[in-house]
Amino acid sequence: MNKTICLALTGASGMPYGLRLLECLLAAGCQVQLLYSQAAQIVARQEMDFELPSRPAEAKAALLARLPATVDPEKLAVFGREEWFAPVASGSNPPDAMVVCPCSMGTLAAIAQGLADKLIERAADVVLKEGRKLILVPRETPLSAIHLENMLRLARAGAVILPPSPGFYHHPQSVDDIVDFVVARILDQLAVPHTLMQRWGE
Ligand SMILES: Cc1cc2nc3c(=O)[nH]c(=O)nc-3n(C[C@H](O)[C@H](O)[C@H](O)COP(=O)(O)O)c2cc1C
């Protein structure tokens, strides 16, 4: 699979979705450009006891240490918050698609307003303007009218709003099964093959 996917981890609850998605993208042979916010580092520590270092090179090493040894390190590029020379910063070199997973309401609002102060927001802005697929996995509950308006605005701009809403009709036996349900939906949107779960009707 020769796709380039930009994956942004932000500070919403749901870091297991983001890290499982990273693993599946790399297992499928995708080139992954990984971005992460400061709040994502806090959530990774809180939810997964995972220290995601601030320096991108150290973050790459920490991520690779968690991933299966079969992963090709060359397929993972990690960029800092204001690394404006990263390919994702320019419409001249956009990824095939971008996923923000998990996506905080803060980052969702920034993207909805076209802000580009941070590389994550700028990359999303670029993906939208270049007509590539932008998938947001927002997590909050309940949702205010502001959250809903931002989501509607983004959906109208072409983004896919994919809340982590697992179904239970496949009888999940573990948290991992629930995580995989959501990750499978994201991979389907990206047209990245997977065998995470049986398809309905098969
Ligand atoms: C453990 C933890 C869980 C959080 N969960 C959420 C959440 O589910 N949704 C959300 O929108 N913000 C959540 N937040 C708040 C965001 O991290 C905060 O608004 C932050 O500024 C978002 O920054 P970012 O968008 O740059 O990652 C959480 C924060 C922490 C520390």
Image (cartoon, rainbow, N blue to C red):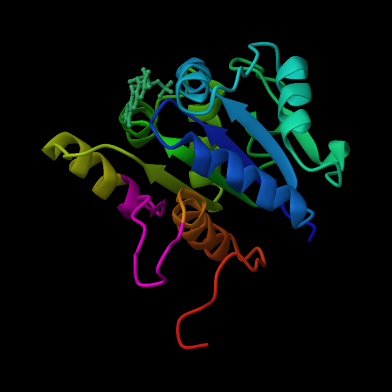
**Residue 153, above or below 10:** below
Determine the residue located farthest toward the front in the rendered image. 173
**Residue name at image x 17 percent, y 40 percent:** 143
Quarter containing ligand 1?
A: top left
Q: Nearer the viewer, residue 128 or 140?
A: 140
Q: Nearer the viewer, residue 102 or 14?
A: 14
Q: Nearer the viewer, residue 189 or 196?
A: 196
Residue 71 lies in the magenta stretch:
no
Determine the residue located farthest toward the top in the rendered image. 54
On screen, residue 194 versus residue 200, left or right, reads right
Residue 30 visible in the displayed image: no
Residue 108 visible in the displayed image: yes
**Residue name at image x 83 percent, y 44 percent:** 71
Determine the residue located farthest toward the bottom in the rendered image. 201
Q: Nearer the viewer, residue 84 or 66?
A: 66
The N terminus is located in which quarter? Answer: bottom right
What's drawn in magenta, residue-wise? Answer: 154-173
Rendered location of residue 45, percent (x, y): 52, 19
Rendered location of residue 153, percent (x, y): 27, 46
Q: How many dots with numbers?
A: 0
The answer to which image quadrant residue 68 occupies is: top right
The answer to which image quadrant residue 107 occupies is: top left
Residue 164 lies in the magenta stretch:
yes
**Residue name at image x 49 percent, y 36 percent:** 125
Determine the residue located farthest toward the left in the rendered image. 145
On screen, residue 120 versus residue 139, left or right, reads right
On screen, residue 188 versus residue 32, left or right, reads left
Magenta part mainly helix, strand or loop? loop
